[in-house]
């Protein structure tokens, strides 16, 4: 947690763009939501042309959608900064106009989520949660930071 899914027409994003978007989303979430980088998961979903519709028309080929499921407890200001920064960075990386980059954040209660064999902590309680993990897992996660 958080899990971000970036959806675009197949072939729209190069491997280098995907890597840069994943880095950007990870950095933004870490900086704004104050969550460890090892929590941030980014998926890319390629959609075949003609498989996405906006209204009753095929979706624009340049459109990029990002949905982020994040733990509840972030302020409106934090979420606004995350939304704007992600939109701007993805636009910069891909050359898509900002109005073609749509970002959605969905708050989920931490107590409804598990990762690494544990129910996720509330925002601000990550250190105690991390300490409850096995030493092997802690070392593995430190390598992701």
Image: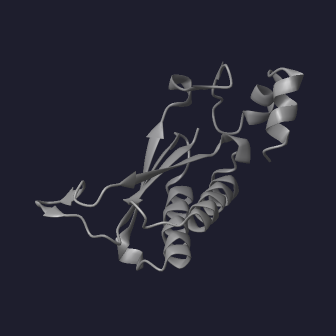
Q: Residue furthest left?
A: 56
Using the image as rendered, state which of residue 102 and residue 21 is in the foreground.
Answer: 21
Using the image as rendered, state which of residue 76 and residue 48 is in the foreground.
Answer: 48
- Residue 36 visible to the viewer: no
Expressed as whole percent of the image width and height from the top left, the position of residue 60 reads 27, 70
Residue at (62% x, 67% y) in the render: 16
Please tell me whether residue 75 is drawn above or below residue 8 in the rendered image.
Answer: above
Expressed as whole percent of the image width and height from the top left, the position of residue 45 reads 43, 50
Q: Is residue 101 left or right of residue 17?
A: left
Residue at (54% x, 26% y) in the render: 113
Q: Is residue 109 left or right of residue 26?
A: left
Residue at (54% x, 78% y) in the render: 92
Please tell me whether residue 95 is drawn above or below residue 141 in the rendered image.
Answer: below
Expressed as whole percent of the image width and height from the top left, the position of residue 22 reads 61, 57
Using the image as rendered, state which of residue 68 and residue 49 is in the foreground.
Answer: 49
Expressed as whole percent of the image width and height from the top left, the position of residue 90 reads 52, 70
* Image-quadrant location for residue 119: top right
Q: Is residue 130 left or right of residue 97?
A: right
Q: Quadrant of the N terminus?
A: top right
Please tell me whether residue 113 is drawn above or below residue 90 in the rendered image.
Answer: above
Residue at (70% x, 39% y) in the render: 124
Q: Is residue 139 left or right of residue 59?
A: right
């Amino acid at each position: 947690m958080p899990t971000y899914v970036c959806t675009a027409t197949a072939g729209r994003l190069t491997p280098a763009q995907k890597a840069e978007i994943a880095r950007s989303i990870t950095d933004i979430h870490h900086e704004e939501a104050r969550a460890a980088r090892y929590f941030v998961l980014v998926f890319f979903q390629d959609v075949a042309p003609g498989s996405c519709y906006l209204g009753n028309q095929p979706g624009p080929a340049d459109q990029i959608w990002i949905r982020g499921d994040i733990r509840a407890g972030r302020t409106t200001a934090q979420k606004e900064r995350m939304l704007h920064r992600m939109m701007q960075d993805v636009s910069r990386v891909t050359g898509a106009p900002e109005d073609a980059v749509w970002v959605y954040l969905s708050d989920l209660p931490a107590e409804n989520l598990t990762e690494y064999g544990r129910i996720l902590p509330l925002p601000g309680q990550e250190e105690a949660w991390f300490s409850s993990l096995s030493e092997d897992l802690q070392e593995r996660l430190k390598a992701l930071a």
